[in-house]
């Protein structure tokens, strides 16, 4: 069994659609009793890839929590390609198992002891001191027995995912996958593990044991499709590995190329992207892995679900038909040929009577192809993404049309809203002597007739929800088209200064993403930094209730580093994905991170009368009121945080000077600073002169008001406003550090910055 090895950093759309009735196990509150709840049934189990999610350690009173954990798992999964585009290829069943005890064994440690639960789930590999804490194992035989409650599924066509009633990070992968149910990162484990068990993808980690970097790979060319020893030029010349994707912007961020490390080795082997979900939980599959997953998912199902039987010759006086699968992002193409000659058009039915075939026998073939752009390898396209059906047509055979009542056999689910760019489908009955048409209407206005698919992305929809109807004969199906996009907001910890969507910090800061939607279900939030890959916002690794923390060095948790953000200016984009699959509009804010002030050796608070001379060390004025001037001598440092200086500040050849959210009622003259010079959120009543400062970082004047003139010259590097302009009259190097005098920069202290398009009463309404 493959262990889920946690990664560097770190949607339930019910699509029950067919008229097929799925047996449900009888509900029972008895310990060990189980209820099968079909969440998404798009076809008979023998023609689908069946995902069976079962819980362990959830008591009878905790089944609602298990349902919420499952909802989050699915909505996150449906937000990741190719699951998002091919979710109609899956059936999903939830198995509610009643446990006599709450929680699972050895959670979080061996000292926690064992619990008697139906699946015998436990951390430490089932409470084995020789194992690792985050490995959750279970009784595979018990899991298999519960999975068998779903008729028509077997080991060949299903994936079991067992969720533990736990908030501790952990899981395992393979034919049977496990995960803690409500850890902040739990919902990202299943897509990674299905990458292993279904896709045959390998881990891209550069370590096998956390905190111990892998050595150098010394083997031959790996069999893994997403690892290689070849250079980019060799891949192109030999047309091997991911040569077709080289140079493409990666779906997981960066560019598809050659990035060192993978297969648990730090050097000597290369992967396509800097990070993907097979390396870092939270990112998407890159194109190389996504192509493999598209192939493997398609291979689990038949692209032709049904059609005119081809077991014996058919007459030339009838209609032939095939029923292809229906991805929710696009339509499969169906083309026809007669005796090897292609017919024009893309259609799922062919009226042989229109061909005027000459007497004799003929070969008619229907070819269904998935034209999606996730696959570039022709061998994959012609394999798992192509299906054919062939008939022998004999003109001497007479067809006696079977009576077929007009109606609809199946469709995109009607019990949940569909996304505004989704392809909605219906399947009609199939008479021998006609090609049925489907009539579509939107909000009562007729759109026209089709053969069964309607691409909503091709329509111009006004914002808001709409009613879509399809009919054939007296049979009608209706859907709510969700064109109300999810909302997203952000909350940041208090910065030094902020203006509109620009924020400046001189230490770690936190970010919380919030949002909501008009439909029920878990809303997925995402962010990305400086155009890198979109990253699932799951809160903080230790708790979904804690915000994400950014810092220059990052935070080490269980030997992994989270939230590292280099010093400088960054653009953070954020968005949400609702249960219908709609992406909200991406918005952004900027953050500039500065070096923190030096540690204090002397601290002054309260009121001090007279001149203050700083001759050595680091003197910090914390909310102090200095009734006099302040001088800073060579090599010394001054940090003023809040309060006021009722006199001038003069500094010559100081190590560092930080004037933060303070008021200075005299002139400020700073020259020759060798370390750092920062003026942030401050107000100077007099003039300021900043000259000849050769600082380690650019001197910063940000979010400040200087009533007198500001003169800057001879400073290296040149001064910066860190993204937040000032209310000043500047000259020389500081001429550009000003804004429109009519604008008002926030410089006052406050507890948090909140910028959100979420109405207060709707905020976090779907955040679990």
Image (cartoon, rainbow, N blue to C red):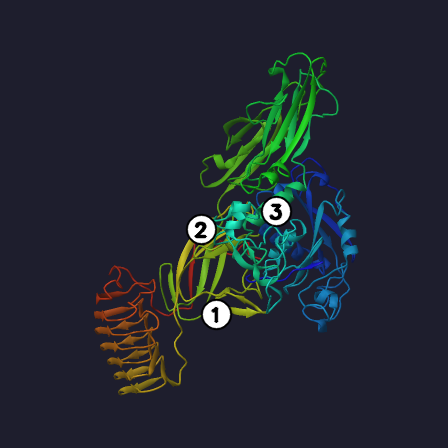
Left or right of 179? Residue 715 is left
Sequence-earlier tag: 3 or 2: 3
Q: Quadrant of residue 746?
A: bottom left
Q: Does any portion of residue 343 appear in the rendered image?
A: yes
Marks 1, 2: nearer the viewer: 1
Q: Secondary structure at mark 2?
A: loop
Q: Secondary structure at mark 1?
A: loop
Left or right of 388? Residue 513 is left
Image vertical order of residue 354 relative to residue 388, above or below: above
Q: Does any portion of residue 407 appear in the rendered image?
A: no
Compare residues 494 and 760 and report the one nearer the observer.
Answer: 494
Q: Quadrant of the C terminus?
A: bottom right
Compare residues 731 and 624 and report the one nearer the observer.
Answer: 731
Q: Which residue is mark 1?
A: 553
Q: Which mark is residue 293?
A: 3
Mark 3 closeness class: few <14, some 14–19, many ≥20 residues within 10 Å: many
Q: Which mark is residue 767?
A: none
Q: How many marks?
A: 3
Compare residues 375 and 44 and report the one nearer the observer.
Answer: 375
Q: Quadrant of the N terminus?
A: bottom right
> How far across and down, in percent of the image, does residue 489 sit?
46, 56
> How far across and down, in percent of the image, does residue 682 sit?
30, 72
Q: Are marks 1 and 2 in contact (CB under 8 Å)?
A: no
Left or right of 397? Residue 747 is left
Q: Secondary structure at mark 3?
A: helix
Q: Are marks 3 and 2 in contact (CB under 8 Å)?
A: no
Image vertical order of residue 317 relative to residue 625, above or below: above
Q: Which residue is mark 2?
A: 586
Tell me the residue at 21%/73% (across/down). Answer: 687
Sequence-earlier tag: 1 or 2: 1
Mark 1 closeness class: few <14, some 14–19, many ≥20 residues within 10 Å: some
Tell me the residue at 60%/16% (across/down). Answer: 355
């Amino acid at each position: 069994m493959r262990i889920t090895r946690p990664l560097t950093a770190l949607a339930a759309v019910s699509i029950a659609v067919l008229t097929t009735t799925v047996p449900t196990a009888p509900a029972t509150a008895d310990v060990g009793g189980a209820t099968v709840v079909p969440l998404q049934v798009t076809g008979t189990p023998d023609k689908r890839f069946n995902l069976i999610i079962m819980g362990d350690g959830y008591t009878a009173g905790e089944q609602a929590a298990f349902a919420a954990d499952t909802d989050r798992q699915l909505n996150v999964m449906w937000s990741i390609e190719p699951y998002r585009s091919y979710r109609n290829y899956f059936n999903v069943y939830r198995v509610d198992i009643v446990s006599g005890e709450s929680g699972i064994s050895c959670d979080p440690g061996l000292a926690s002891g064992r619990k008697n639960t139906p699946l015998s789930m436990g951390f430490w590999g089932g409470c084995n001191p020789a194992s690792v804490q985050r490995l959750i194992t279970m009784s595979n035989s018990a899991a298999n027995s519960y999975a068998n409650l779903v008729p028509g599924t077997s080991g060949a066509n299903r994936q079991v995912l067992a969720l533990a009633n736990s908030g501790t990070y952990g899981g395992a992968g393979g034919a049977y996958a496990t995960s803690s149910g409500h850890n902040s990162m739990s919902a990202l484990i299943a897509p990674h593990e299905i990458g292993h068990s279904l896709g045959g993808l390998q881990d891209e980690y550069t370590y096998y044991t956390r905190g111990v970097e892998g050595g150098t790979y010394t083997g031959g060319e790996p069999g893994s499709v997403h690892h290689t020893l070849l250079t980019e030029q060799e891949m192109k010349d030999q047309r091997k590995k991911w040569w077709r994707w080289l140079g493409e912007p990666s779906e997981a961020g960066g560019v598809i190329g050659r990035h060192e490390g993978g297969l648990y080795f730090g050097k000597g082997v290369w992967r396509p992207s800097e990070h993907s979900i097979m390396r870092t939980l939270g990112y998407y599959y890159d194109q190389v892995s996504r192509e493999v997953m598209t192939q493997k998912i398609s291979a689990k199902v038949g692209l032709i679900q049904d059609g005119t039987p081809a077991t014996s010759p058919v007459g030339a006086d009838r209609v032939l038909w095939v029923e292809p699968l229906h991805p929710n992002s696009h339509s499969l193409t169906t083309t026809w040929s007669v005796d090897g000659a292609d017919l024009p058009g893309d259609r799922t039915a062919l009226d042989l009577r229109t061909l005027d075939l000459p007497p004799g026998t003929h070969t008619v073939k229907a070819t269904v192809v998935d034209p999606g752009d996730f696959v570039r390898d022709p061998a994959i396209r012609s394999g798992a993404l192509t299906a054919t059906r062939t008939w022998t047509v004999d003109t001497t055979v007479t067809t006696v049309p079977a009576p077929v009542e007009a109606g609809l056999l199946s469709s995109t689910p009607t019990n949940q809203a569909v996304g505004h760019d989704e392809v909605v489908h219906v399947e009609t009955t199939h008479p021998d002597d006609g090609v049925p048409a489907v009539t579509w209407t939107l909000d009562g206005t007729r759109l026209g007739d089709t053969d069964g698919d309607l691409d909503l992305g091709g329509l111009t929809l006004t914002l808001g929800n709409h009613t879509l109807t399809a009919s054939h004969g007296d049979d009608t199906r209706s859907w709510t088209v969700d064109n109300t996009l999810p909302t997203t907001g952000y909350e940041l910890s208090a910065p030094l200064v902020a203006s509109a969507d620009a924020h400046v910090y001189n230490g770690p800061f936190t970010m919380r993403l919030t949002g909501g939607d008009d439909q029920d279900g878990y809303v997925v939030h995402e962010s990305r930094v400086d155009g890198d890959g979109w990253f699932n916002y799951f809160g903080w690794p230790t708790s979904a209730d804690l915000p994400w923390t950014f810092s220059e060095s990052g935070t080490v948790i269980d030997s992994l580093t989270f939230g590292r953000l280099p010093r400088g200016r960054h653009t953070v984009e954020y968005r949400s994905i609702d249960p219908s699959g709609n992406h909200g509009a991406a918005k952004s804010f900027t953050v500039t991170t500065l070096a923190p002030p030096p540690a204090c050796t002397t601290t002054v608070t309260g009121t001090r009368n007279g001149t203050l001379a700083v001759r050595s060390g680091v003197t910090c004025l914390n909310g102090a009121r200095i009734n006099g001037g302040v001088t800073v001598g060579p090599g010394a440092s001054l940090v003023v945080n809040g309060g006021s200086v009722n006199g001038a500040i003069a500094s010559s050849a100081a190590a560092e000077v930080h004037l933060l959210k303070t008021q200075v009622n005299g002139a400020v003259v700073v020259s020759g600073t060798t370390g750092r010079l920062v003026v942030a959120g401050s107000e100077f009543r007099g003039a300021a002169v900043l000259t000849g400062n050769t600082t380690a970082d650019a001197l910063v004047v940000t979010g400040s008001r200087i009533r007198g003139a500001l003169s800057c010259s001879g400073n290296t590097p040149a001064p910066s406003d860190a993204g937040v302009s000032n209310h000043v009259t500047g000259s020389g190097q500081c001429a550009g550090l000003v804004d429109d005098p009519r604008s008002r920069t926030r410089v006052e202290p406050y507890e948090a910055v909140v910028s959100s398009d979420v109405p207060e009463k709707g905020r976090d309404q779907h955040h679990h």
